[in-house]
Amino acid sequence: MKRQPIYVEVPIYTDIDAIWDASQQPDRHEQWDLRFSSITYLPKKEGEPQAFVYSRTVGPFLQVEGWGESVGSFHKEDGTRSSSLHFGTEQWISPIREGRGYWKYEPQEDHVKFLTQYDYEVNFGKAGEIADRAIFRPLIGWATALSFDVLKRWLEQGEAPRSQYMRFFSTYLMTLLFAFIWLYQGLIPKIIGMHPEERAMIGSALPISENGITTAVLIIGIAEVLFGLVWLVYRNKRQLFILQLMVFPLLTIATIVADPATTIHPFNPVTFNFPLIVLSIIGVWMSKDIPSATSCKRKR
């Protein structure tokens, strides 16, 4: 199968000089581009390509370093600019061995079309190619698109990239937390364990038979599991945080009414749900208009 290059395009409603500076000055570039932790230009003579070294911190004990050369130039009378790039790394652990690409800045009537296309050779032979197509290429394409949207918001709205990334990753950490809570609460104590306290609360709240209690607990468990899955797939996380702000107080009140004795348990509905309500309030604020890779065009 022919390898598809990575392509990302985004309209940015600002002047071309602002985009050029934000992408060509290393101290500004490294602020918004998720693919790099640091970029350092090396001394050069006039007329030579600009050489640089870059690094990407992957984890607490792993940092990938590489080299690159870029050439920026004007191409057309309409002001279109481009910057070609040759990059690579000698580190064996890197999925990328060597690659080439370009950035292009195309002035439009009321915005600048900022785009990139690049491709690379991979390490680890055939296994590396399979892993690249299945995992790494989609991941780095997503990171490029997310970075472009962060740049767009920075230049258009003025919010610093660090602030955007803090809101983005905080939102998705809370997304994983709430998905885990709903999936666990639905699956373990209800569907799998059918815990006696779950049955007792349903029996206290509803005048139904033992078989009806079992069915009700299963239905509630399935609903919680489904809501946990919704957290993983639904894009507008802010709406889910708002929904939880309505659901958690109601669940707390319903549990206390069904079994008032639960309020004196070591782990009770009040102490469990109150922190979740606070996290949901924080989530409503953090998740407002977060950057997204979906705002970029990914195919030419």
Image: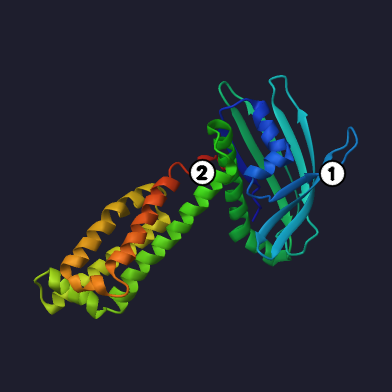
Q: What element carries label 2?
A: loop
Specify whether residue 242 is in view. Answer: yes
Residue 21 position (above or below residue 287): above
- Tag shown at residue 291: 2
Q: Which residue is drawn at 57% across and 26% down?
A: 111
Extreme-left residue of the structure: 207
Q: Which residue is drawn at 36% across and 57% down?
A: 230
Q: x, y (%) of residue 8?
A: 60, 41
Extreme-front residue of the structure: 264
Q: Is label 1 in contact with label 2 (beta carbons under 8 Å)?
A: no
> Image quadrant for the C terminus?
top right
Crowd around label 2: few <14 · some 14–19 · many ≥20 (10 Å): many
Residue 49 position (above or below residue 134): above
Q: Is mark 1 on a helix, strand or loop?
A: loop
**Image quadrant in which you'd find residue 16:** top right
Closest to the observer: 88 or 176?
176
Q: Which residue is drawn at 65% across and 32% down?
A: 19
Residue that mark 1 sits on: 42
Specify whether residue 300 is in view. Answer: no
Closest to the observer: 83 or 240?
240
Q: Residue at x 43, y 57 (%)?
A: 175
The disc labelled 1 sits on which kind of residue? Leu
Q: x, y (%) of residue 291?
A: 51, 43
Disc 1 to disc 2, how far (Cα)? 32 Å
- Tag shown at residue 252: none
